[in-house]
Image (cartoon, helix red, strand yellow):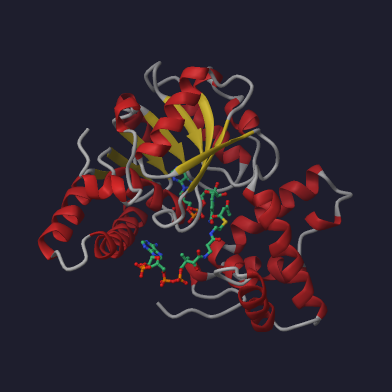
């Protein structure tokens, strides 16, 4: 797999000599899946992006192209031809499909980024486990569910890991690599190398709720929502405070809108069920109302703030 020195020096692709993963299947063409497909394609991998219907996939393709333009602008400033080539080549490595069982017949890695519901993830992995080649590695991008529990429906627990990306995937450099007790050394090494090959910095963590980042970040978002609900300060002032007083790139309420309230609420409700005595995991009234009204944040056009496309 060949990479330009420019991509490598900008942190977009590294240590490719150890990366044995050539074809990647990304399941879920939403916020995260589109980003994961994009970073894999722009670092030279062939990618198939799978979602339930053609309409979602067309939307994903559009958002990937827009994001690639932003990346190209940064990588190839004042080099229009190079920028165009980068975009065209990256796009050409991505195909889309709604036939997951067919796609996984020939793939090295499956990264699942569908809705944050255990039963839906179980259904997906139990369907593809008998069809995918022996050597294929399965990974989940879950924010908060147990990787061990997700993997439990498959017969390839040794070839299963968590690969947790951050939004926006093309910008955020971190990947949390979650090793479950069954993950083999070979699988662990392959996903670590692949994470570097797509230009990310991997860290390793155990399969504990929220892994590292979300275990610290989600309680902060929840506390900010509760603070606003109590009327201690407005959403806008809480956000200004955390940006100017604590150096956060986004305030916690802006970030909750950015992550998506369906996702955040699923995380909090799951943890509340598991740890009912921890007040940090008590689901917030205003967030439940937003989800009921379909106000999921940036992706639906409204959350704690309103957004124009
Ligand atoms: C829930 C989970 O399981 C885990 C999670 O993901 S938790 C959420 C983690 N994410 C965060 O915490 C994000 C916090 N926010 C930020 O880091 C920043 O606000 C941000 C990077 C999103 C945007 O940065 P900003 O300075 O406010 O806006 P903006 O100027 O538009 O973007 C900054 C750069 O990123 C680029 N960028 C932003 N979004 C992009 C995208 N989707 N694709 C490509 N490039 C993008 C922009 O082009 C811009 O590039 P230049 O610096 O070359 O101009
Ligand atoms: N939103 C965020 O900031 C982050 C989310 N995550 C996790 O990533 C996963 C996806 O989250 P988002 O991208 O935000 O959600 P999203 O709602 O934007 O996208 C999910 C996509 O999955 C598709 N889908 C649902 N069931 C499917 C199935 N059976 N087969 C194929 N496609 C299916 C939906 O049509 C949708 O396009 C979740 O597990 C979430 O917890 C992880 C990191 C950050």
Q: What residue sits 72% from the left and 47% below the top?
A: 270
Vertical arrangement, residue 305 with respect to residue 213, above or below: below
Q: Left or right: 53 with respect to 127?
A: left
Q: Which of 9 and 270 is in front in this view?
A: 9
| Residue 96 in sight | no
Q: Left or right: 184 with respect to 104?
A: right
Q: Where is residue 103 in the image (x, y as percent from the top left)?
A: 32, 32
Q: How many marks?
A: 0
Q: Left or right: 254 with respect to 190?
A: right
Q: Left or right: 61 with respect to 227?
A: left
Q: Nearer the viewer, residue 24 or 238?
A: 238
Vertical arrangement, residue 55 with respect to residue 274, above or below: below
**Quarter containing the N terminus:** top left
Q: Position of residue 149 (x, y in %)?
A: 65, 30
Q: Position of residue 80 (x, y in %)?
A: 13, 65
**Quarter containing the C terminus:** bottom left
| Residue 270 in sight | yes
Give residue 22's quadrant in the image. Answer: top left
Q: Where is residue 223 in the image (x, y as percent from the top left)?
A: 76, 66
Q: What residue sits 64% from the left and 69% below the top?
A: 252
Q: Nearer the viewer, residue 198 or 14?
A: 14
Vertical arrangement, residue 232 with respect to residue 74, above or below: below
Q: What residue sits 64% from the left and 41% below the top?
A: 145
Q: What residue sits 86% from the left and 48% below the top?
A: 276
Residue at the extreme right: 277
Give residue 119's quadrant in the image. Answer: top right
């Amino acid at each position: 797999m060949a990479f330009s020195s420019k991509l490598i020096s900008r942190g977009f692709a590294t240590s490719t000599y150890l990366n044995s993963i050539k074809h990647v299947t990304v399941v879920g063409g939403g916020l995260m899946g589109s980003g994961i497909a994009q970073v894999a394609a722009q670092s030279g991998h062939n990618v198939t992006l799978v979602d339930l219907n053609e309409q979602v996939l067309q939307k994903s393709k559009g958002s990937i192209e827009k994001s690639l333009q932003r990346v190209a602008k940064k990588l190839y400033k004042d080099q229009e031809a190079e920028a165009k080539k980068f975009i065209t080549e990256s796009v050409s490595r991505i195909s889309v499909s709604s036939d997951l069982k067919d796609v996984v017949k020939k793939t090295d890695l499956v990264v699942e980024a569908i809705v944050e519901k255990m039963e839906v993830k179980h259904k997906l992995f139990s369907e593809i486990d008998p069809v995918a080649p022996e050597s294929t590695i399965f990974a989940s991008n879950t924010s908060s569910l147990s990787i061990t529990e997700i993997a439990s429906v498959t017969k390839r627990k040794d070839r299963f890991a968590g690969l947790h990306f951050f939004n926006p995937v093309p910008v955020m450099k971190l990947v949390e690599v979650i090793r479950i007790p069954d993950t083999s050394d070979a699988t662990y090494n392959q996903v670590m190398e692949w994470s570097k090959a797509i230009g990310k910095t991997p860290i390793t963590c155990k399969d504990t709720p929220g892994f590292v980042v979300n275990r610290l970040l989600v309680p902060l978002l929840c506390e900010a929502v509760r603070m606003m609900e109590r009327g201690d300060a407005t959403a806008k002032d809480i956000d200004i405070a955390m940006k100017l007083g604590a150096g956060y790139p986004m305030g916690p309420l802006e970030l909750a809108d950015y992550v998506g309230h369906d996702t955040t609420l699923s995380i909090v409700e799951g943890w509340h069920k598991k740890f009912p005595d921890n007040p940090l995991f008590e689901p917030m009234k205003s967030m439940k109302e937003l989800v009921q009204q379909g106000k999921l944040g940036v992706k639906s056009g409204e959350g704690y703030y309103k957004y124009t496309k």
